[in-house]
Image: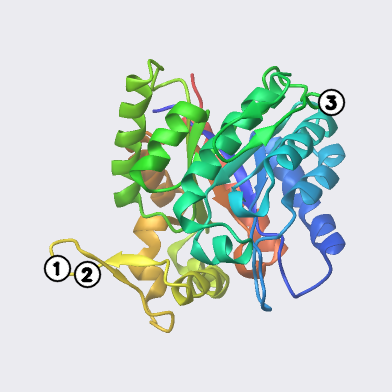
Amino acid sequence: MPNMSFGLALDFGTERTSLDRVLDGYIPAIRLAERYGFDSVFAGEQFPDAPGNFHIPAPFLVLASLAPRTSLRLGTGVSLMPGWQPLRLAYEGAMLDQLSGGRFTLGIAVGNPPDWKRFGIDRAIAGKRLDEMLMALKALWRGESGFHGELTTIDQTIRPLPLQPGGPPIWVGGMAPRAARRAATLGDGWYAATPYRRTDMAGQIRRYRQALQDAGKDPDSTAVVANRLTFLAPTNSSLAEGRPYLERVLRSYARGGGLLAQKPGADGAPVRLDPDAPDLIESTAAEISLIGTPEMVREQIQAYAADGVNQIQMRVAPGDMPPELIAQTITLAGEQILPHFRQR
């Protein structure tokens, strides 16, 4: 059985209650994950402008508040480049690493056109800006006295430095070929977001591994991470309990045009899914989710492992999932899935 590590990806944005209560409500789930051998908890970043379920615009603040309350690694899955100025990100990343005792991992991606427009980033330079941001972070976190690029100029060092020598690991997201090269040359891993289909991920992982080889790096030495909507139930008949919460998130992705499926009889061509389609879960489950009994999900994870994924971030609390169902997923995963993927 392949060796794989597992983390939690938690949804913190909600209109249901205040953020302090959301955090308090997650502590039992985080404690449970600690006991079962999960190794991290991640928070996504989003810049919402309407009510609903969403990632939060300031995940560093949430992770800082969690730092003294858990022993798990903390990370962003992912931070979005348009919302950050490079020097500020270097300072805040170093501070979060200090606050967490050297347990921070930065996941980051270039974002999308609405984010670029919102923060005044020219589409033509978005990729270059992220490349230079990553180079600047690495330099400043090593203690160098600045960074000079075409778009980014920093004429100072930072203090305090991160606790982790050279700075926190950086996991780079994105499905474009350039993102694979960026992750290989400027990052420490590649991160697949929730809506990335496994079919597409397999190709990107191959590009990433080739880019690592081209850069003289060991393809087996870095993180390949998949964030997956996850719901486990003891029997097939009890899977329906999680359906409304999973659908809430899937419909949100579909409304944004970011949810794809294979169209039967179209030579595998992906199509955008209708957010009102009654079979939304069935159309996407095999590609972007881990849904089923523990036996079913073990087989799904083995397929990811065969593609080269070595870490799964289980998104166990989508759409205001009730605490008892979150605990059910973590417990079933901890008892019947994680032990099968630990190195013996």
Q: Quadrant of residue 279?
A: bottom left
**Quadrant where the N terminus is found in the figure:** top left
Label 1 CA crowd tier, 10 Å (few <14, some 14–19, many 20+): few
Q: Which mark is residue 159?
A: 3
Q: Which mark is residue 266?
A: 1
Q: Position of residue 203 (x, y in %)?
A: 28, 42
Report helix, strand or loop for mark 3.
loop
Give how far apart the Cα atoms at labels 3 and 1 are.
56 Å
Q: Which mark is residue 336?
A: none
Q: Position of residue 146 (x, y in %)?
A: 70, 25
User: Which residue has dot 2 on it?
Assistant: 263
Residue at image coords 42%, 66%: 258
Report helix, strand or loop for mark 2.
loop
> In front here: 82 or 287?
82
Q: Position of residue 92 (x, y in %)?
A: 78, 39
Label 3 CA crowd tier, 10 Å (few <14, some 14–19, many 20+): few
Give how far apart the Cα atoms at labels 3 and 2 are.
53 Å
CB under 8 Å between callouts 3 and 2? no
Q: Earlier in the sequence, mark 3 or mark 2?
A: 3
Q: Quadrant of residue 244?
A: bottom right
Q: Amino acid at mark 2?
A: Lys
Report helix, strand or loop for mark 1.
loop
Left or right of 317? Residue 31 is right
Q: Position of residue 101 (x, y in %)?
A: 81, 27
| 44 vs 103: above or below | below
Evaluate whether residue 88 shows in this view. Answer: yes
CB under 8 Å between callouts 3 and 1? no
CB under 8 Å between callouts 1 and 2? yes
Q: Earlier in the sequence, mark 3 or mark 1?
A: 3
> In front here: 100 or 183?
183
